[in-house]
Image (cartoon, grey):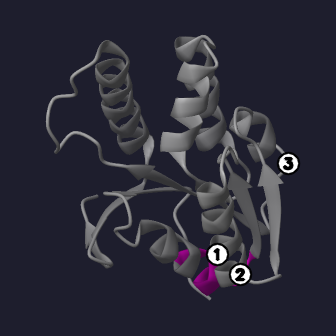
Amino acid sequence: MKHLPNLTFILGGAASGKSAYAELLCTQSGQAKIYIATAQLFDDEMGAKVAKHLDQRGTDWTTIEAPLHVASALKTASAVDVVLVDCATLWLTNVILGDHDLGVQTDELLTALTSCMAPVIIVSNEVGQGIVPDNALSRRFRNAQGQLNQDIAARADAVVAVMAGLPLVLK
């Protein structure tokens, strides 16, 4: 069993190994595992990706699908659980594309992350190392993701960047 901080933030690029690392931390904790999924299945490719993740995790996880309501889902956890939120990037996409109040939704998420009874691990994409997007929506998303990542990192007890499957402890 491995003791986890109250809030662990794991970020990295797409397909960097961040989700696998987060799942490993949850498994090593020895606690009951809750997976809060933020993905929405809009096409077969995403469906295949989700099926692969489900298969890799195995059957000893409780999965809560919460594309928008992560804060509510976090309230269901108890001190005997460990919670993995995967991922903040898809959650943010859902909020922006659904034209929800980003400020209110972000405040609710940040409060829930820091007040959850269980240790929480949240995964997010680092999107600020690429080129400047060529359209307003993409720039808005990139800026919002950068701010969300900074806000989560400021509240997290541990922050880990994952590149090529290798964890690099930042905090």
Residue at position x 77%, y 66% in the image: 81
State the separation of the CA atoms marked 3 and 1: 25 Å
Badge 3 density bin: few <14, some 14–19, many ≥20, Cα 10 Å? some
Residue 73: x percent and y percent? 79, 43
- Residue in front for this viewpoint, 159 or 145: 145
Can residue 71 be seen from the camera position used here? yes
In the image, which disc is placed on residue 115? none
Q: Is residue 16 above or below residue 120?
A: below
Q: Is residue 127 left or right of residue 22?
A: left
Q: Secondary structure at mark 3?
A: loop
Q: Is residue 160 magenta?
A: no
Residue 132: x percent and y percent? 15, 29
**Which quadrant is home to the N terminus?**
bottom right
- Residue in front for this viewpoint, 65 or 158: 65
Please report whichever mark, 3 or 2, sits nearer to the chain's N-terminal start: 2
Residue at position x 38%, y 25% in the image: 141
Can residue 3 be seen from the camera position used here? no
Badge 1 density bin: few <14, some 14–19, many ≥20, Cα 10 Å? few
Q: Which residues are magenta?
A: 25-31
Q: Is residue 137 left or right of residue 53?
A: left
Q: Is residue 27 above or below residue 8?
A: below
Mark 2 and 1 residues: CB-CB less than 8 Å, in contact? yes
Q: Secondary structure at mark 2?
A: helix
Residue 12: x percent and y percent? 32, 58
* Mark in the foreground, 3 or 1: 1
* Mark in the foreground, 3 or 2: 2
Which residue is disc 3 drawn over?
76
Which residue is disc 1 drawn over?
52
Mark 3 and 1 residues: CB-CB less than 8 Å, in contact? no
Q: Secondary structure at mark 1?
A: helix
